[in-house]
Amino acid sequence: MQLIVSAGLIAAVVLWGLVSPATLDSVFSSLLADITRSFGWFYLWVVLGLVVLAFFLAVSRYGDLKLGDEDEEPEFSVGAWFAMLFAAGMGIGLVFWGVAEPVSHYVKPPPGIAPGTPEAAGVAMRYAFFHWGFHPWAIYGIVGLAISFFTFRRKALPLVSSATEALPWPFVRRLSPAFNVLAVVATAFGVAASLGMGATQINSGLHTAFGLPIGPLVQSLVIVVTTAVFITSAVSGVDRGVKWLSIGNLVLAGLLALVVLCLGPTVAIIDTLTNTLGAYISEFVRMSLRMSPFRENSWVGDWTIFYWAWWLAWSPFVGLFIARVSRGRTVRQFLVGTVLAPSLVGFVWFAIFGGTALNLEIFHGVPLAEAVTANVSTTMFVMFQAMPMGMVLSGVATVLVFVFFVTSGDSATLVLGTMSTGGNPNPPNRVKVVWGVLVAAIALSLLLAGGLKAIQTATIVFALPFSVVLVLMAISVTLAIREDWEAEQKRDRALRRKMREFVRD
């Protein structure tokens, strides 16, 4: 029943986007503007609360609880585990926005900062750290922790609804099928929208490296080829396709970052990392709760609240996937691996690519501000053209984007297959193939019809109801963790008492 409702809702919105993309865009854009204006504060408080909860659970006495039986060992090595969760979480986003976002903020900074100034450059880097740091990873981390805790410790099905089982309110459990429907819809639309956006950047890379024209034909071919590869990877299983692609891509991303660090303004990059990290930490709370009630300015809504809604919409997909590969970790290991470690990698990435871009824009006159205004997807390649080995860097970056999309696609088909088969952690290959083809068809049809942006907006609108579900999941997993910890303490006390009695006898 849940599958029928989910598929019906997806089909209805896609059909709407094909028949009248302008109307779909208008309706959902209006809804998004209303949600941003009326519920922006709610997003800010919820996401900050998840950051606080993640850090509390990581450093608390509950951190030693294992996600699974007490004698279970992790299924994957630390390196493979981190590579998979990073690739599924936001690897492609870092490549797309690593240059474009700092330059965008430099051109149009938050209210109160003059554009094109050194102050604007500093703020641009700080907000890039903020938008890609602890907050989004805390969203993914808490969703993943909730699903993995109930799946591996309570032996529940790996579904979003299972993560609310510890709540004491019966009416919430009656609503749980709707939670799974929301998760399927958000995942399908989110992946489809990202496939479409990724196709535009790959197209830009191919244009830079090989002179291919930028347009819907090339972008459609990119989607078809990407889909064929990620379906092949998905049916080969997590142990082979997803795992090795993720490891290879993380290595390739690390090499690309290292080359840019060496070829770019190395000392300035290190200075940028140092300065921005200090500013990010010192301004953490203020940025987390920043609104503009006394200004007619939409910057916070256009960036921060938009991002938070996007991460919330993606959280069921990423959370369920990282739960799938995290069996045997402790709560502390899980949260360090899903919140702290990827945030630090993101900081280094933005310092290298964003720091290089701003340095070239400010001191060398490279027209990156013009590029980001004209076409965001080309900004990174414009930067590479101004550097030594620019053609090689552009080629490597294009491959990187392609493989990141493959890893996102195959992990998404696994998650959609799991959710649509009642929580089967290893859904049949035919189900994976069907979902892979459907997601690609959504992206392809809407790209050609001009409705892709509308579907991206629709995905974010679905984030509002799911944010309520996420709050319920956070409460539920906190209660369950405390219950299991107290039960373990009770068992340990009973065991010690028996040992003392045995020794006395």
Image (cartoon, grey):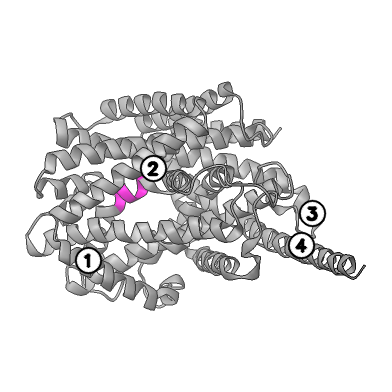
Q: Is residue 96 magenta?
A: yes
The quadrant where residue 385 appears = top left
Q: Is residue 335 magenta?
A: no
Q: Residues within 10 Å of mark 1 (few under 14, many from 20)?
A: some
Residue behind mark 4: 488
Tell me, for residue 453, which label it has, or none.
Answer: 2
Q: Nearer the viewer, residue 426 or 40?
A: 426
The magenta segment: 92-97
Q: From the viewer's perspective, tell me whether residue 442 is left or right of residue 345.
A: right
Q: Nearer the viewer, mark 4 or mark 3?
A: 4
Q: Nearer the viewer, mark 3 or mark 2?
A: 3
User: How much space separates mark 3 and mark 2, taking CA atoms?
Assistant: 36 Å
User: How much space separates mark 2 and mark 1, taking CA atoms?
Assistant: 36 Å
Q: Residue at x 49, y 29 (%)?
A: 234
Q: Position of residue 290 (x, y in %)?
A: 43, 73
> In the rendered structure, which disc, 3 or 2, sits on the residue that comes first in sequence?
3
Tell me, for residue 171, which label it has, or none.
Answer: 3
